Amino acid sequence: MTAMGYRVISFAYDDVAHRPELCVSLLRMVLSYFQADGTPQQLQEAVEREALRLAYRLARPLRPIDVEQHLHVGHRTAVKTLQSLCSKSLLSPVAGPGGKHVVRYELRQLARKGLWL
């Protein structure tokens, strides 16, 4: 099972029968590795950081579909993430033909230092 990628946890019958609290504690310790550590705010910040990393890596204006595919999130989540980065002045929206809808987001340049964020 381990060779196939599964994590195997074994307990002696005596431990399960006579000390179940020990088994439960050990299982909680193993499973805690897979639990999310942060609050929803911290998770949102992690999503935003990853979207910025994607923008740097692509070196072109970022589209919501890029964020969707990279982070495996829905369209609304991708757009909200990009809008949040715009409100923090890290990205700037780029309107499409006709100027009605925002179709891309590009990294903003710091005016004083001439550096890309």
Image (cartoon, rainbow, N blue to C red):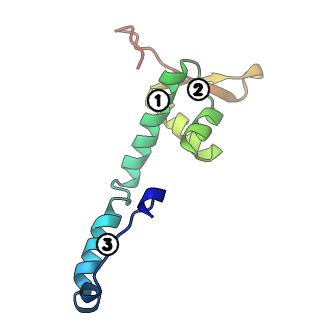
Tell me residue 20's x, y (percent).
26, 86
Numbered circle sitting on residue 27: 3
Numbered circle sitting on residue 100: none
The mark that comes first in sequence, 1 or 3, is 3
The C terminus: image quadrant: top left
Q: Is 70 located above or below residue 18 in the figure?
A: above
Tell me residue 50's x, y (percent).
45, 35
**Crowding at label 3, few (<14), some or many (≥20) Cα neighbours within 10 Å?**
few
Camera-near label (1 vs 3) is: 3
- Dots 1 and 3: beta carbons under 8 Å? no
Residue visible at 62% across and 47% down in the picture: 74
Q: Is 28 located above or below residue 97 in the figure?
A: below
Q: Quadrant of residue 30?
A: bottom left
Answer left or right for 47 relative to 9. Answer: right
Distance (Cα) linking label 2 and label 3: 42 Å
What's the residue type where badge 2 is placed?
Leu
Numbered circle sitting on residue 62: 2
Residue visible at 24% across and 83% down in the picture: 21
The secondary structure type at the circle numbered 3 is helix
Camera-near label (2 vs 3) is: 3
Q: Quadrant of residue 22?
A: bottom left
Residue visible at 66% across and 28% down in the picture: 102
The mark that comes first in sequence, 1 or 2, is 1
The mark that comes first in sequence, 2 or 3, is 3
Distance (Cα) linking label 1 and label 2: 9 Å
The secondary structure type at the circle numbered 2 is loop
What's the residue type where badge 1 is placed?
Leu
- Dots 1 and 2: beta carbons under 8 Å? no
What's the residue type where badge 3 is placed?
Leu
Distance (Cα) linking label 1 and label 3: 36 Å
Q: Which residue in the structure is indicated by mark 1?
A: 52
Q: Quadrant of residue 18?
A: bottom left
